[in-house]
């Protein structure tokens, strides 16, 4: 792989140990994937922030990089394992909180903006069409590539940190136009008109095509909340990092020869498979992190009501602060639900805490079952709120 003089210097260690280590990772990746050169990135988003997933080995790695590493481009973080301010209200213990604070402090020392959200595009890390970026949260990667038209591979935690500390990524995969073309035509014959149905669609398509790039036909409309749900589930159940939807997403693509169909029956089956919980004792909204519009709708539905089950609404800190200003937090928390900022129900250490979770997110169902041993039920936001107050 060709390196510029500046990049050679970075690799030699002349710009510090963290930059050297980062360049070693990027050069190794580039060589594995046959990249010809490194390219500049305009932003980075780092996943692998929860101490629950990092453990002490991850924390030591970050502390080492933080000795002399500084982010060179706009860099934000995925959710942490707790609300960084109100962790006690989520039942997090002091020992975990202390470790999680150390993780966040290491990132802060590296000049990373400690946003802690999987929807960076809602709170100030919004690339434009065509920009090269290095993001690692799978739902955000899919949103950036598909909905915005920016260009990123699905980075791992270490490679995204390496990009933050160097401002570079190897040019391969989805950074190249020829790798962004649709490979399967997906004819949707079902009515997809709600967040859970978009989640179910992502599950059906993801399981059928794995990590191929689909061109999806037959979707009449999709709002931001529905698209973020689709991005999360198609990446979770299939592994694709880019899709095209005719008439909705901005990237140009060829029309592939291979085609499949998605029927109403398959969508109903997917919803039923994600709904094995008989008893519900937890309501989890905000996967990916809730938008201010979703929080507004929840506040309207909860006004004057009392929740009877634990109810988390996971969101970015900045979105919560807006909800505070609008009075939504008072209404929601007055009703007994909790706005869980900086974290989510998949990365918080709550394994085994609940029997059954209701949610509007297919991805949340996947992680609740796989990581936390909860049964799940997927329903509309309205039905989730109704279940909370039942
Ligand atoms: Fe975000 Fe957590 Fe879901 S990181 S996409 S809310 S599993």
Image (tube, rainbow, N blue to C red):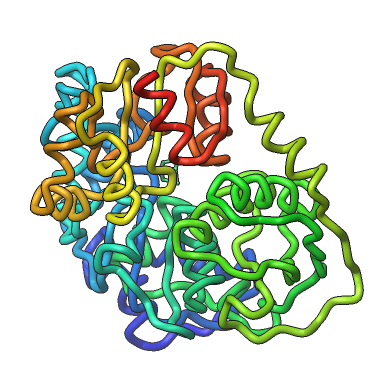
Q: Residue at x 23, y 30 (%)?
A: 338
Q: Is residue 68 above or below residue 152?
A: above
* Towards the viewer: 163 or 137: 137
Residue 262: x and y, percent? 81, 54
User: Which residue is most to the left?
Assistant: 325
Residue 36: x and y, percent? 59, 82
Report if residue 61 is visible in the image: no
Q: How many marks?
A: 0
Q: Quadrant of the C terminus?
A: top left
Q: Is residue 165 above or below residue 60?
A: below
User: Which residue is most to the front?
Assistant: 304
Q: Quadrant of the N terminus?
A: bottom right
Q: Is residue 333 left or right of residue 384?
A: left
Report if residue 115 is visible in the image: yes
Name which quarter of the figure residue 176 lies in. bottom right
Q: Residue at x 74, y 68 (%)?
A: 218
Q: Is residue 347 above or below residue 373?
A: below
* Towards the viewer: 188 or 78: 188
Q: Residue at x 22, y 53 (%)?
A: 319
Q: Is residue 321 above or below residue 214?
A: above
The quadrant of the picture showing ligand 1 is top left
Q: Is residue 262 left or right of residue 337?
A: right
Residue 223: x and y, percent? 49, 65
Q: Residue at x 27, y 44 (%)?
A: 300
Residue 139: x and y, percent? 50, 54
* Towards the viewer: 90 or 44: 90
């Amino acid at each position: 792989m060709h390196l510029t003089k500046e990049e050679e210097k970075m690799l030699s260690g002349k710009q510090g140990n963290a930059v050297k280590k980062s360049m070693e990772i990027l050069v190794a990746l580039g060589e594995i994937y046959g990249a010809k050169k490194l390219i500049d990135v305009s932003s980075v988003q780092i996943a692998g922030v929860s101490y629950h997933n990092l453990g002490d080995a991850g924390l030591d790695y970050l502390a080492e990089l933080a000795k002399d590493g500084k982010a060179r481009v706009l860099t934000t973080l995925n959710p942490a394992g707790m609300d960084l301010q109100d962790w006690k209200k989520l039942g997090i213990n002091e020992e975990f909180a202390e470790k999680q604070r150390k993780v966040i402090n290491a990132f802060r020392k590296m000049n990373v903006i400690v946003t802690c959200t999987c929807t960076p595009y809602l709170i100030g890390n919004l690339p434009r069409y065509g920009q090269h970026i290095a993001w690692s949260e799978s739902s955000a990667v899919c949103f950036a590539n598909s909905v915005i038209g920016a260009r990123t591979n699905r980075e791992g935690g270490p490679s995204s940190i390496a990009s933050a500390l160097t401002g570079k990524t190897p040019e391969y995969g989805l950074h190249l136009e020829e790798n962004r073309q649709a490979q399967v035509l997906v004819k949707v014959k079902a009515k997809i008109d709600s967040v859970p149905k978009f989640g179910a669609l992502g599950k059906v398509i993801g399981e059928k095509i794995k990590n191929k790039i689909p061109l999806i036909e037959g979707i009449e409309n999709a709002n931001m909340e529905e698209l973020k749900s689709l991005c999360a589930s198609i990446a979770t159940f299939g592994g694709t990092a880019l899709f095209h939807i005719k008439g909705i997403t901005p990237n140009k693509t060829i029309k592939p020869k291979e085609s499949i169909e998605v029927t109403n029956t398959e969508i109903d089956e997917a919803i039923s498979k994600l709904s094995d919980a008989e008893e519900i004792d937890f309501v989890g909204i905000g996967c990916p992190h809730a938008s201010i519009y979703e929080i507004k709708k929840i506040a309207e539905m909860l006004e004057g009501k009392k929740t009877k089950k634990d109810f988390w609404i996971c969101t970015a800190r900045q979105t919560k602060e807006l909800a505070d200003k609008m009075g939504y937090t008072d209404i929601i928390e007055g009703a007994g639900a909790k706005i869980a900022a900086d974290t989510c129900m998949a990365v918080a250490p709550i394994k085994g805490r609940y029997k059954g979770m209701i949610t509007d997110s297919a991805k949340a169902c996947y992680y609740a079952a796989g990581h936390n041993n909860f049964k799940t039920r997927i329903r509309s936001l309205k039905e989730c709120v109704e279940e909370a107050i039942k």
